[in-house]
Image (cartoon, rainbow, N blue to C red):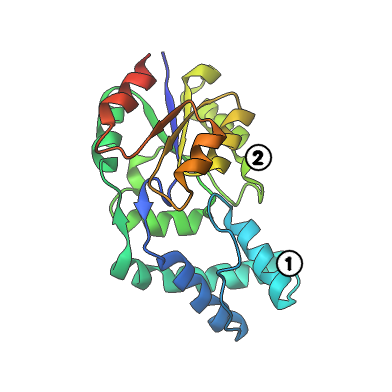
């Protein structure tokens, strides 16, 4: 039976070490001449479009496509150099992607990143080509609306539907759990991001693991069940 794994990026596949926020701050300076801390914005599990809306609300800029594109492009320009200093693939992820593909599972993305940012981050580690397609912040500002886009692309990719019980949303925040529930998917949370373990437990994912290196067997046994 077809099995679809929908992977988040930041905190799930990659640990950026703050490179994304640093690139966004630099982009804000380069595009708008503004220097301000962004620590008052809760980035975890949010989409880039949502984050940019919060930035503009704090700086007094109008949130429109022109300003969004201006800031996003400045952010993309800064991102590669910042990644070189701090970004790493989280433990067990590459092996899990390889094992999933070898098992006939379909790896795809469900991420709050804009497409260009996702590609830069994953290409930096040679991982972009591991994912057949994705749903991104380009599709919606609201993370809970991304799942249906991922399912539609899976349908186009395969030429058929995948039953919800064979769709797994893999993330590191309560927002990942919530967006998985919207599409009736099963949810797997890894405790490798910025969310506290307590908040992950409270979100009640179908499976909670510490990381993919230590608990790969539990991860794949849950998918295969």
> Residue at the location (54% across, 20% down)?
164
Left or right: where 112 falls relative to 96: right
Q: Between residues 206 and 21, which one lies in front from this camera angle? A: 206
Q: Between residues 164 and 157, which one lies in front from this camera angle? A: 164
Residue 22 x/y as whole percent: 45, 72
Residue 148 x/y as whole percent: 62, 33
Place residue 3 in its image quadrant.
top left
Q: Between residues 106 and 210, which one lies in front from this camera angle? A: 210
Left or right: where 57 falls relative to 51: right
| Secondary structure of the residue carrying numbered label 1 | loop
Q: Is residue 13 visible?
A: yes
Q: Note whether 111 is above or below 167 in the view shown.
A: below
| Secondary structure of the residue carrying numbered label 2 | helix
Residue 74 x/y as whole percent: 52, 74
Residue assigned mark 1 = 63
Crowd class of label 1 (few under 14; some 14 to 19; many from 20; radius 10 Å): some
Q: Between residues 189 and 202, which one lies in front from this camera angle? A: 202
> Residue at the location (62% across, 67% down)?
69
**Quadrant in the picture for the C terminus:** top left
Q: Is residue 161 visible?
A: no
Residue assigned mark 2 = 145
- Residue furthest toward the bottom? 33
Residue 202 x/y as whole percent: 55, 36
- Tell which circle, 1 or 2, labels the residue nearer the N-terminal end: 1
> Residue at the location (33% across, 27% down)?
219
Place residue 49 in its image quadrant.
bottom right
Cα separation between marks 1 and 2: 20 Å
> Residue at the location (56% across, 30% down)?
151
Place residue 1 in its image quadrant.
top left
């Amino acid at each position: 039976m077809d099995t679809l794994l929908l992977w988040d990026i930041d905190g799930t596949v990659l640990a950026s070490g703050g490179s994304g926020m640093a690139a966004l701050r630099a982009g804000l300076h380069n595009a708008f001449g503004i220097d301000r801390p962004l620590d008052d914005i809760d980035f975890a599990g949010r989409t880039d479009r949502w984050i940019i809306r919060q930035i503009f609300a704090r700086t007094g800029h109008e949130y429109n496509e022109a300003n969004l594109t201006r800031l996003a492009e400045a952010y993309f320009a800064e991102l590669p150099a910042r990644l070189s200093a701090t970004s790493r693939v989280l433990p067990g992820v590459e092996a899990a992607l390889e094992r999933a593909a070898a098992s006939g599972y379909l790896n795809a993305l469900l991420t709050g990143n804009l497409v260009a940012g996702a590609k830069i981050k994953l290409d930096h580690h040679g991982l972009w080509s591991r994912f057949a397609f994705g749903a991104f912040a380009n599709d919606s500002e609201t993370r809970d609306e991304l799942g249906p886009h991922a399912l539609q692309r899976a349908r186009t990719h395969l030429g058929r539907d995948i039953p919800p019980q064979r769709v797994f949303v893999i993330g590191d925040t309560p927002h990942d759990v919530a967006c998985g529930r919207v599409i009736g998917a099963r949810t797997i949370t890894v405790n490798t991001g910025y969310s506290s373990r307590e908040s992950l437990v409270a979100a009640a994912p179908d499976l909670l693991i510490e990381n993919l290196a230590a608990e790969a067997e539990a991860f794949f046994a849950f998918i295969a069940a």
